[in-house]
Structure formats: structure tokens, C-alpha cells
Image (cartoon, grey):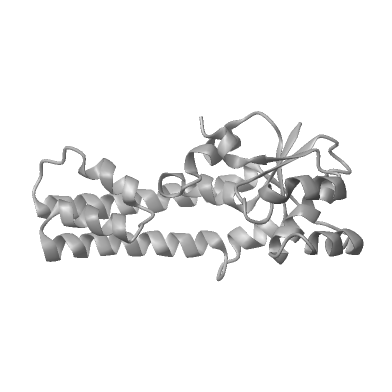
Amino acid sequence: MDFFLDSNVIIGYVFYQADYWGIPSKNVIKRAEKKYSGHTVEVECFDLQRGKCSLVRREISSEFFKAVANIEENQSIDFLLYDAEIEKWKIINILKNILDGFKGDIISLKEELREYQRRFEIESKTRQKSVKNLVIFSYRTQRYKDIHAALGKIIQNINDIEVILDAHELAHIHDELVLITGDHKDILKNKPNILPLVKILDIKNLMEYNS
């Protein structure tokens, strides 16, 4: 059995400490199965301007800056955690880990936040580079118009259709190919209708790998 990874697996792995899918994504990447993905996911994740890696990295960086500004303004850890929870920051769990049992003053806390941000950026960029060695990206050669039209009747997101077709073509080479995704809205809930149309062996919920 081989895995075909949707974009949320890759994003979760790159930013695993600040991503909802972080733990299951890391677990999937660590598994022994060969891991593949397609050009659609590659562009969606790694495009320099609109790719999710660039967008998420900027969002996380902004949250660290807001955390420092919040501490400077309110001089309160409780206020910081409250605002992070209300605004649903990606770094909320990171903040909780940093602040758990923190005994220093506000100045040292700001420095700790800045240092953690620097380390996080370095580590996430390292993981992003490692993806190219851990995942094999394929390029689809056929459009599969009939299957595309059939999928279009049950899936609204065009990118999700392209991801499924990328996996479908690769499944002609790898007989037991399983699509791993966290996309419930368009893919997981439509699994019974998708599988009869394509050669993919199965579609699995990324959260199945949470432990």
C-alpha cells in the first residue's frame, strides 16, 4: 500500500506545532509506506506568492508579533492567552507551552517569544525542504474529462477534483494507492460516490493517524 497526500497533510507536517493537522500529518510522514502527491498539491503548497506554505508562514509570523505587542500593551499573560483563544491564533498551543510555569518578567517573556519565533521559522523551513525528499510529486498527463465531469456533480472545489484525478492517474501505476486527506466537506463525505469513479484503492481521514 502507498499513500497519496493531500495538501493538508503537507501543511500539517511543515507547521505541525501550529497546525490542527500537525500530529497526524507528522505521523503519516514518519510511516514506512511510500508517499506520493501531485502537481496540484505541489503548487497549492509551494507556490512562492499564493502557496499555502508562504501564507501560513506569514500568518504565524504576524501572530508572534501580535503576541509581543499584546504583552507590551497589557503586561498580562492572562490577557494574551484570552486574546489568542478568542481570535483563534494558530500559535495558541505554542503560547501555552511557553507560558506554562513561566517565572520570568515581561521583558524576558518578550525575548522568549522572539527567540521561539526564530526557531520555529528555521525548523518549518527545514521541514518544508525535507518534503521534497520524503514525498514523490507526480505530473498528470491526462485530463480525464468524463471523470472530471462526474466528480464535478458532487464536489464544488475544482482543486479537490484535480487532486483526486492526480491520484487516479498514479493509481494506474501503484495498484494499492490510498488518498490521505483532512478535507471532509468535499472529499471524505463524498467517499462512497468518489471511489466507484476512480482507481484509487481507498480514501482515509487524516485524523485516523492522530495517535
Outermost residue on the bottom side: it is 49
Nearest the camera: 45 or 48? 45
Q: Is residue 142 visible?
A: no
Q: Position of residue 30 (x, y in %)?
A: 58, 32
Nearest the camera: 74 or 184? 184
Above or below: residue 17 compared with residue 31: below
- The answer to whether residue 41 is left or right of residue 141 is left
- The answer to whether residue 137 is left or right of residue 67 is right
Quadrant of the image occupied by residue 141: bottom right
Q: Is residue 99 visible?
A: yes
State how many labels appear.
Answer: 0
Above or below: residue 72 compared with residue 8: below
Nearest the camera: 203 or 17? 203
The N terminus: image quadrant: top right
Q: Which residue is drawn at 41% across and 45% down?
A: 17
- The answer to whether residue 148 is left or right of residue 115 is right
Q: Where is residue 54 in the image (x, y as percent from the top left)?
A: 50, 63
Q: Position of residue 150 (x, y in %)?
A: 85, 60
Q: Residue at x 48, y 52 (%)?
A: 125
Q: Position of residue 175 (x, y in %)?
A: 86, 36
Q: Residue at x 13, y 66 (%)?
A: 73
Above or below: residue 23 compared with residue 39: above
Quadrant of the image occupied by residue 103: top left
Q: Residue at x 59, y 60 (%)?
A: 46
